[in-house]
Amino acid sequence: MFTDSHCHLDRVDLKPYAGDFSAFLQQTREAGVGRMLCVSIDLDRYPGMLRLVEGEDDIFVSVGVHPNEPDRRTPEPEELVELACHGQNVAIGETGLDYFHSKGDLEWQQQRFRNHIRAAKLCAKPLIIHTREAREDTIRIMREEGAEQVGGVMHCFTENWEMAEQALEMGFYISFSGIVTFKTAEDLRETAKRVPLERILIETDCPYLAPVPHRGKPNEPRYVSLVAQCLANLRDMPVEDMAELTNENFARLFLKV
């Protein structure tokens, strides 16, 4: 069984499934995906995302506003805490900093990040952190706001070992997506070899970032097995063992078991 620790099920193209979300889930489960975390990136779509997956015992959700959503208001910590009370909710995010897509004065983005960390501390739930070209500020704000008190995951990690090491020191997990399978990702694969096995997660970030050999096509949770296989090869271990340990890591971080 595989766990897709980060996907956006409300954004999956259901045309291959005749628009039937149930058929999509059935095929996903038949492919060996036993758990999924459906991650919020804006509050407008959060209610619809909940309705889509409500009652599915193997699907969990998070609540948050992505750093690349400049036109969305920044929620106060108390609002995020209230939204996180839903029974399937296990995390706050995704949140963080992205200096690749957003330019100029990004104080609003930093404040949004701080609000999410404060919300996570209020409701004692882990953070899902997105970071791109903002290494120093991401780590600085995490430290200033006490993110280590709740921990979480650096999702879709593409940064260097130095940043991974700093996040690990704060109790965070490192999650790898299909990017780790890309031919150009040699440096990332070297980082993946160094992350402690008890801190690794796997994800698809679907419908984005499909792994090789599906790169450039719509991504799906069933492709998380390809991420697991790549990491297993790097660590010289059976893919079944990689699946098992990442399942255990997910349960420890998000389900507190």
Image (cartoon, rainbow, N blue to C red):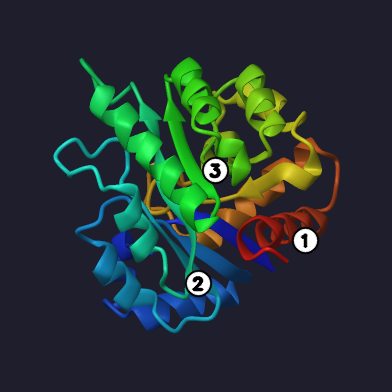
Q: Is residue 141 left or right of residue 166?
A: left
Disc 1, SS: helix
Quadrant of image for the C terminus: bottom right
Pick whichever of labels 2 and 3 is earlier in the sequence.
2
Most foreground residue, 167 or 13:
167
The residue that appears at 51% across and 46% down in the rendered structure is 127
60 w.r.t. 202: above or below: below
- CA gap, disc 2 to disc 3? 18 Å
191 w.r.t. 171: above or below: above
Q: Residue 95: horizontal and vertical position, in percent?
A: 40, 41
Q: Quadrant of residue 85?
A: bottom left
Q: Residue 219: horizontal and vertical position, in percent?
A: 42, 53
Q: Nearer the viewer, mark 1 or mark 2?
A: 2
> Which residue matches tag 1?
244
Q: Residue 154: horizontal and vertical position, in percent?
A: 55, 38
The residue that appears at 53% across and 81% down in the rendered structure is 57
137 w.r.t. 253: above or below: above
Pick whichever of labels 1 and 2 is earlier in the sequence.
2
The residue that appears at 49% across and 57% down in the rendered structure is 123
Disc 2, SS: strand
Q: Amino acid at mark 3?
A: Ser
- CA gap, disc 1 to disc 2? 18 Å
Pick whichever of labels 3 and 1 is earlier in the sequence.
3
- CA gap, disc 3 to disc 1? 17 Å
Q: Is residue 86 left or right of residue 222?
A: left
Mark 2 closeness class: few <14, some 14–19, many ≥20 residues within 10 Å: some
> Which residue matches tag 3?
177
Most foreground residue, 203 or 112:
112
Q: Amino acid at mark 2?
A: Ile
> Which residue matches tag 2?
59
Instruction: Tell which residue pokes out farthest to the left in this image.
Output: 71
Q: Residue 86: horizontal and vertical position, in percent?
A: 41, 72
